[in-house]
Image (cartoon, rainbow, N blue to C red):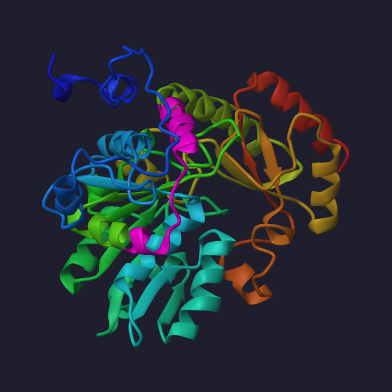
Amino acid sequence: MSSNKLKRETRAIHHGVSATNKRENSSPIFLNSSFNFATAEDAEAVFLNQKEAYLYSRFSNPNTDELAHKIADLEGAESAICVASGMSSVFNSLMPFLSTGDHIVSSINIFGNSLNIINDFLPKWGIEFTLADFEELKNLESLIQTNTKLLFIETPSNPSLRLFDIEALARVCKQKNVLLIVDNCFATPFGQQPIKFGADLVIHSATKFIDGQGRVLGGIIAGKKKWVDECYNFLRRTGPSLSPFNAHLLSKSVETLGLRMEKHSSNALILAQKLENHKKIKQVYYPGLPSHPDHHVFKKQMDLGGALIAFEIHGSKKEAMLLINSLSLFRITANLGDSRSIITHPASTTHSKLTLDELAAAGISGGLMRISVGLEHADDLWDDLELALDKL
C-alpha cells in the first residue's frame, strides 16, 4: 500500500530506518560518534558534499534522521532536523536568520525562557525586537518595520492558551517577506499542523508530549527545506545535537503520540468543563470550550484541544499555593506533557523573570494556574482537584 494513502497514526508506527542484516523488528540504536568510509576517495566525496553519507553524529545519525523524518511527515513539512532540547529549537530557529540591525516581532504570550532569549540576548547582538500582546498582533502589519525578519509565536500560547489565527498572520508575513515561526509544542502534530496554514518553520520541545513520559530532552525544527537547511548549517557548526539514544526513545514515543493526545485531550475537556462550573473558579481557558475567546480559531485550525488548561481562582498567589499544595495526584515539576498530571504556578516559576507589566500583558495573575492533564482516569483527577478547591 502506498504510504500516501496511510493515516498519520499508521505512518508514525511504520516509518523507520531500513533494517540491518540482523533483521531487527525495531530500529537499533546507533550509539557511535562517527562513521567509517570504504575508501579515502569516499571520505573526500562526502566532505565535499558530492556524496551523501553519515559522517559524524553531530551532523546526522540514523536515529535522529528517523525521528526528524517522522515529525516532518506528521507536520506536512518538506524537511526537519533534531536538536538537543526545546530551547535549542527556539534558538536554532531564530539565529540563522538574524544579523546586527535586524528586527523581530514576537508574541509576549510565550514560554519564559523564549522571552529571555529575546529580551536579554538579542539586544547584545544588536538585534531589535517588538513584543506584542494578543490584541496588538491582530494588527501585525503595523508592527512590521523595514528591517523586520521574522515573527515568532506560540499557539496555543503559554500559559494563557490563547490561539493565534496562523493563516491570517501568515498572509501578512508573506506580503511583507517576513518568516513565520510557530512553536507547536502544546498542540503537537496530531492537534495542529501550522505549515498547512502558512507557517514557514514549526518547532517542538520533544521533551514534552512527543516523549510523553518525562524521560529525555529533545527538540525539533520542521518546515520548508530551504529554511531547515539554514538551521541545519547553524546546528552543524554550533553543536546542540540530539543524542542517538534520546532520538531512539522519542521515535518510539511518536508511535503512540496520536493515541496519547486523544486521551490527554478528552481528559482535559472533562476537567475544563467541571472547573468552569465550580464556584471557586474565576476563569477557565481551554481551546475546546465554547466559552474560550478564540474557540472559533480552534474550530478552524485544531484537531484536538490538547492537554493544557489554564484557570484562575478567586484569589491571589497565597490561595494558588494552598491549592497546589493540597493536591496529591498532580505533580509540581518543571515540565509538561507527561503521562502524569502536572500543575504549575506560572507567575512564580516559568514566567517569574517577567516584570509586573509584562506579566499583566501576558495575562498572568497571581491566581492563574496551568495544568497539564495526564493519562490518569478523569474521575480521579477531578476528585483530587475538587478536594483541593474545597480548602480555599
User: Is residue 286 rendered to the left or right of residue 228?
Assistant: right
Q: Is residue 251 magenta?
A: yes
Check the picture and name the quadrant holding the C terminus: top right
Image quadrant assignment for residue 280: top right
Work out whether 76 lies above or below 369.
above
- Can residue 210 be seen here? The reply is no
Work out whether 100 lies above or below 138.
below
Q: Which of the two residues, 220 or 389, is positioned nearer the viewer here?
A: 220
- Can residue 159 be seen here? The reply is yes
Q: Which of the two residues, 106 or 69, is positioned nearer the viewer here?
A: 69
Q: Which residues are magenta?
A: 234-254
Check the picture and name the quadrant holding the N terminus: top left
Q: Which of the two residues, 67 or 26, is positioned nearer the viewer here?
A: 26
Work out whether 390 lies above or below 33.
above
Across the whole image, how many numbered discs are drawn on residues?
0
Task: Locate residue 119, reporting x and y percent.
Answer: 53, 76
Task: Locate residue 196, reporting x and y percent.
Answer: 23, 45
Work out whether 126 lies above or below 262.
below
* Residue at point 64%, 41% (across, down): 371
Q: Which of the two residues, 75 or 134, is positioned nearer the viewer here?
A: 75
